[in-house]
Image: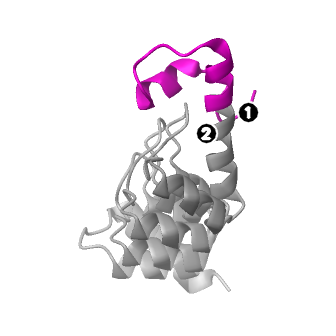
């Protein structure tokens, strides 16, 4: 069983045809979906494009709520992110932990991916652990500067203090 699917065929049934699947069909469907997540992680644009062109939802998610874009972003698969965004992927779709792709990028420190998501309208204040807070916590100075250029929301007092200290003292 693929780790993205974690044995959860119920999640697949919600996103596929409501008709009952045989156990063999269910297994093949799980393998098909697992491939899509692997293609997103591994920057396999060509294979994922074929799946999207044949009906796979651009916002397809696993049992954790991680979309193809979330996985592509988290693994710095820039070309796959371009593909998904050009097909209309929801740039701020949150997973089951209320995290956005941009927050994952701030955790990992991928500057170019952060730029790409922001270009497509990602919200630096979205989610329970916002990308701005994530960039502060993980000391992503360049990403934090970028995020601050893309927000109209005034930082909290604690954020302002930390940003002032962080931007002044971080090399």
Q: Relative to 136, say whether 52 is above or below.
A: above
As drawn, the label of residue 33 is: 2
Give residue 34's position: percent from left, percent from top: 67, 40
Quarter residue 87 falls in? bottom left
Q: For the point 45% across and 30% down, which residue is it?
A: 16
Give residue 58's position: percent from left, percent from top: 44, 53
Q: Which residue is mark 1?
A: 2
Mark whose residue sits in front, 1 or 2: 2
Pointers 1 and 2 in contact (CB under 8 A)?
yes
Q: Residue furthest right?
A: 1
Q: Relative to 74, say whether 77 is above or below.
A: below
Q: Relative to 80, say whether 20 is above or below.
A: above
Stretch of the chain drawn in magenta: 1-29
Q: For the point 59% across and 58% down, which residue is it?
A: 48
Q: Relative to 116, say whether 91 is above or below.
A: above
Residues at marks 1 and 2, CA–CA distance in whole angstroms = 9 Å
Q: For the point 46% across and 82% down, which residue is it?
A: 145
Give residue 141's position: percent from left, percent from top: 57, 78
Is residue 90 shown left or right of residue 115? Answer: left
Does residue 76 show up?
no
Is residue 112 shown left or right of residue 156? Answer: right
Quarter residue 1 falls in? top right
Tell me the element at label 1: loop
As drawn, the label of residue 18 is: none
Tell me the element at label 2: helix
The foreground one among 72 and 157 is: 72
The foreground one among 168 and 21 is: 21
Residue 17 is inside the magenta segment: yes
């Amino acid at each position: 069983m693929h780790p993205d699917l974690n044995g959860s065929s119920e999640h697949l049934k919600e996103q596929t045809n409501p008709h009952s699947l045989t156990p063999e069909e269910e297994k093949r469907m799980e393998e098909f979906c697992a491939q899509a997540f692997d293609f997103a992680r591994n920057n396999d644009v060509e294979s994922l494009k074929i799946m999207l062109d044949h009906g796979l939802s651009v916002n397809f998610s696993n049992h954790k709520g991680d979309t193809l874009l979330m996985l592509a972003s988290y693994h710095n698969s820039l070309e796959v992110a371009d593909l998904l965004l050009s097909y209309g992927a929801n740039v701020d779709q949150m997973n089951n932990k209320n995290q956005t792709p941009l927050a994952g990028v701030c955790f990992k420190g991928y500057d170019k991916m952060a730029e790409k998501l922001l270009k497509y309208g990602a919200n630096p204040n979205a989610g329970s652990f916002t990308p701005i807070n994530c960039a502060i916590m993980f000391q992503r100075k360049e990403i934090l500067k970028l995020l601050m250029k893309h927000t109209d929301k005034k930082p909290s007092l604690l954020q302002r203090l930390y940003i002032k200290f962080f931007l002044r003292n971080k090399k």
